[in-house]
Image: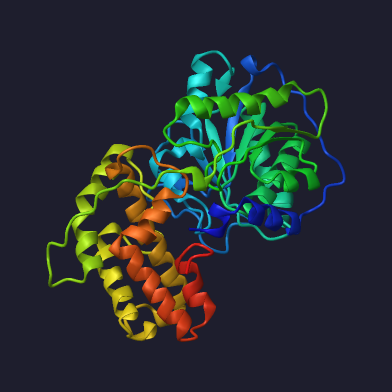
């Protein structure tokens, strides 16, 4: 399991040492009453629609995506392995609470849901300069043109707190009232963010519990209460914490080996294909496709099986000129394939980090990738080749 998934103290230490941009002042906009306000979501999960180019590694500073209110076929474009992607696979509202806003608007709690919402990538540079000077102000103008008054800002990975707090400063300076939902209180305090709800949830789970509408509404209600503060900066603590160590292991049946002529990981991936497509038909979204398609998963696992068996990683079929990036993206797609189908097959709730743990500990695919990673590490391959094939802290 990821060190960030298991150890809150490690995350706090990371947050306390993170280089942060400085702002001369904290703007603090008092919006109209919430029951009359138009609300938008801005997330740093790198979300984009299926079939679009989405986010590329290296372009995150100046790129953001516009998400129409009705859109649900969203793909996770954030490339870090160190947050819980299984929560998003189970329920996009845990990162992007669009359905919860619709319900709050119907109940009259908020005035209106904005017609457009926005996604950035959270893994920005230390200065976050492009967001501060270009893409952030440009996004603010788009929201103001639509008469948005309140912006809920959510993050995912361990680097996201710096980005969401920067966005809050930029938006507030432009005239928008913002609420950051963050697990990194230290970053919010050091950056003097206008309003923040501090949640002790694992990274990647901004609203806490996937598939739990009541809990997600409770988080949003606590966030909106910050709008009652007459001045800022203000940080409130959400009273319920969620720990990865408290979750029951994922109960998810796996098929027996059907074709003894195939490597067990290859046979397993082929046998699970129908479950993957059932999940896709139900949700109308998938985050597979960063490097390969779902149909290419078995072939990709065959390459990792060869590395695990001792073949050199440069000779199994990966593009040599960009092998580190290709291998990283390929593992991203394999893990995503399994996480999404696990949400279809699982008995019981999807707890934090349980799909990641199930993938690496229980599936032939995860075990094969870990073995290939160990072989490369022990062969003194460059760290860029093997480190990103699993979450931090994995052996």
Question: How far across and how far down the image is residue 106, in percent?
Answer: 49, 15
Q: Residue at x 59, y 45 (%)?
A: 155
Task: Examine the rendered structure and indicate whether residue 68 appears above or below residue 277.
Answer: above
Q: Quadrant of residue 177?
A: top right
- In the image, 188 versus 286, the foreground residue is 188
148 displayed left or right of 47: right
59 displayed left or right of 128: left
Q: Residue furthest right?
A: 24
Q: How many marks?
A: 0
Question: How far across and how far down the image is residue 172, in percent?
Answer: 75, 35
Question: How far across and how far down the image is residue 282, in percent?
Answer: 28, 38
- In the image, 50 versus 314, the foreground residue is 314
Task: Examine the rendered structure and indicate whether residue 154 appears above or below residue 236.
Answer: below
Q: Residue at x 87, y 46 (%)?
A: 24
76 displayed left or right of 193: left
Q: Is residue 317 visible?
A: no
């Amino acid at each position: 399991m990821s060190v960030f998934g298991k150890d809150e103290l490690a995350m706090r230490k990371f947050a306390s040492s993170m280089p942060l941009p400085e702002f001369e002042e904290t703007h603090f906009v008092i919006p109209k009453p919430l029951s009359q306000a138009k609300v938008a979501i801005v997330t740093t999960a790198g979300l984009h629609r299926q079939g679009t180019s989405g986010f590329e590694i290296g372009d995150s500073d100046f790129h953001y995506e516009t998400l129409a209110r009705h859109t649900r076929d969203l793909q996770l474009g954030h490339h870090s392995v160190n947050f819980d992607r299984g929560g998003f696979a189970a329920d996009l509202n845990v990162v992007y609470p669009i359905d919860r806003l619709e319900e709050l608007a119907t109940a009259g709690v908020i005035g209106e849901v904005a017609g457009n919402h926005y996604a950035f990538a959270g893994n920005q540079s230390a200065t976050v300069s492009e967001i501060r000077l270009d893409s952030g102000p440009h996004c603010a103008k788009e929201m103001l043109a639509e008469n948005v008054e309140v912006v809920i800002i959510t993050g995912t990975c361990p680097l996201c707190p710096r980005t969401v707090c920067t966005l809050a400063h930029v938006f507030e300076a432009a005239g928008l009232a913002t609420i950051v939902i963050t697990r990194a209180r230290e970053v919010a305090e050091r950056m003097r963010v206008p309003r923040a709800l501090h949640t002790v949830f694992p990274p990647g789970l901004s609203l806490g519990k996937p598939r739990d509408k009541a809990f997600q509404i409770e988080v949003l209600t606590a966030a909106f209460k910050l709008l009652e503060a007459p001045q800022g900066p203000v940080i409130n603590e959400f009273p319920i914490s969620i720990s990865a160590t408290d979750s029951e292991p994922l109960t998810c049946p796996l098929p027996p080996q059907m074709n003894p002529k195939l490597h067990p990981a290859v046979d397993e991936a082929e046998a699970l294909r129908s479950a993957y497509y059932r999940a896709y038909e139900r949700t109308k979204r998938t985050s597979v496709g960063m490097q390969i398609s779902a149909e290419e998963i078995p072939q990709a696992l065959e390459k990792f099986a060869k590395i695990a068996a001792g073949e050199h990683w440069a000779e199994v079929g990966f593009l040599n000129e960009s092998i580190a990036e290709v291998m990283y993206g390929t593992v991203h797609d394999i893990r995503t394939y399994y996480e999404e189908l696990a949400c279809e097959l699982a008995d019981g709730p999807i707890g934090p980090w349980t799909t990641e743990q199930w993938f690496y500990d229980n599936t032939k695919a995860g075990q094969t990738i870990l073995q290939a990673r160990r072989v490369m590490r022990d062969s003194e391959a460059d760290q860029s080749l093997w480190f990103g094939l699993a979450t931090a802290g994995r052996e």
